[in-house]
Image: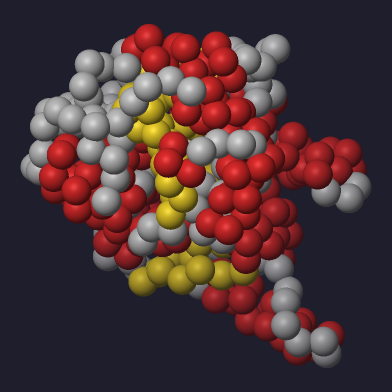
Amino acid sequence: MKATVLVSRGYSRKTGYYHRANRDRTTLTSLGLETAIRRAYLTGDKEGWRRLVRAVSTLRQIAADDIIVIENYGALSVYVAMRLFIRRPNHRAVLVVHGSLAELREYRWAAVKRKAYSLIEKLSIRLLDRVFCVSQVMTAEFKRQYPAFSMKVLCSPNLPPADFYSAVRSAHAIGRRQIREQLSMPRRASILLYAGNTQVWQNISLLIATARELASLDGFHTVVLTTESEAMTRLFRAAGIPSAAFTIRVAQQHEVPAYLVAADWLFVVREENEINRVACPTKAVEYLISGTKLVTSAGLGDISRLVTELDAGIVVKMRPPIAPKALARAISAQASDGSGSSNQLPVPRTLPPPYERGNTERLFADVIRKNEAACG
C-alpha cells in the first residue's frame, strides 16, 4: 500500500507544522506503507509549463495512492480540487487540523482566505474518512459544528517521536546531580528552563522579566536552549540579568530530553486567544512527559487543564498578563527544598488518553484496516 502526506507552503518553514507532517509520514511508514511527502504548492522553476507538468504529475501520484493524509487547510483546498477531476473511491482521506483559522490573520487577504477555507472545510467533510484534531478542545468544537459527521472526528495530539520517550527513560535512570554534571548545569540551583527561540508569541519578554526577578532571589538560575543564542544573550544582558544567573546554549536535539528532566521548571506561556485555545504545542506535551513541573498559561488547548489535573505546575492568567514579580514569587513558593542538589528526579508522567504514547499509530492503523476491508 502507498500513502501521501500532502503539505502546504508552511511545510517549508520547518515549524511545528513541518514536524507533525514528518511524524505522520514516519508513523505510516512504520505501519508498512510506502509513504511520500508531496507539496500542494508550486516552487522552483520560473517556467510556468514546468511547474504545471510537476503539478499534474503530483496529482497523478496522489490519485494512485491508498491513503492520503492532508495536513491542514492549504493542502485540503488542493485535495478538494483534485476530487473534482479524479475520482478514486477506494482511497482513504484523513484531514489533520493543526490549528484555528485565526492563524491566517498575519497573512495578506486574511479575511478572504478564512472565508474560503471555511467553505472548503464544509464542502470536504463528506469526502473525508477521518478528521484528526490536535486537541480535545478543537475536537469538541468540530463535533458541535458537524454533528452528522461527529464519528469521523477524532483527537490526535502532537506527540513527540518514539526516541523522545526512550531518551526521557534514559535520563530518569540517572540521578539529577549526575545529569547536571554531564550537562554542565548548576548543581544546587532551582532551574527555570525554556527551549525555543525569540518569537514574540513565545512570550520571551515575560520569560526574561521573570528571569530577572528570579536572579534577585537566592538559588535560582535560568537556562535557555535556542538556535538563536547570540540574540537571546543580548536580550538577557540588556535586561540587566547577571551573567551568573543565566545560561544560553545551543543543544543537540537528542540532548533536550535530559535538559528537561534535569530542570525544575519548564516555561511554555502563550497569550489567551482564539489560536491558542485549540492549540497543542509539541513542546508542552514533551514538557509534561518529562515529569518536570511546567509554568504555563490558561487557555492553552488541553495543556492548561492537564497541568491542573496532574498537579504538574503553575497555570497563570494572561488576561491581564501576570506580573513577572508575581510569577517569580509563585515559582519560588513552590520550589522544592534543595531540588537542585538532590539526587531525586521528578517522576515520569503517563498522560491520559488521547495523549498516551502510540495514539497516532492506532488511529492510522484503523484507517488502513478500513481501506483494506473496502478493497477486499
Is residue 364 shown to the viewer in this render? yes
Residue located 35% across and 47% down the image: 160
Residue located 58% across and 42% down the image: 236
Compared across the picture, whether 355 is left or right of 235 comes to left
Residue located 36% across and 39% down the image: 286
Quadrant assignment for the C terminus = bottom left
Q: Is residue 10 above or below residue 339?
A: below
Question: Where in the figure is residue 291, as x and y percent of width and height?
Answer: 26, 30
Question: Where in the figure is residue 85, as x and y percent of width and height?
Answer: 71, 66
Q: Is residue 132 above or below residue 309?
A: below
Quadrant assignment for the N terminus = bottom left
Question: Where in the figure is residue 128, as x and y percent of width and height?
Answer: 56, 45
Q: Nearer the viewer, residue 281 or 322?
A: 322
Q: Is residue 326 above or below residue 212?
A: above
Compared across the picture, whether 13 is left or right of 105 comes to left
Q: Nearer the viewer, residue 334 or 364?
A: 334
Count the marks: how many? 0
Is residue 270 shown to the viewer in this render? no
Task: Specify the color scheme.
Answer: secondary structure
Compared across the picture, whether 44 is left or right of 65 comes to right
Question: Where in the figure is residue 328, as x and y percent of width and height?
Answer: 49, 18
Q: Nearer the viewer, residue 281 or 372?
A: 281
The quadrant holding residue 117 is top right
Residue located 62% across and 54% down the image: 231
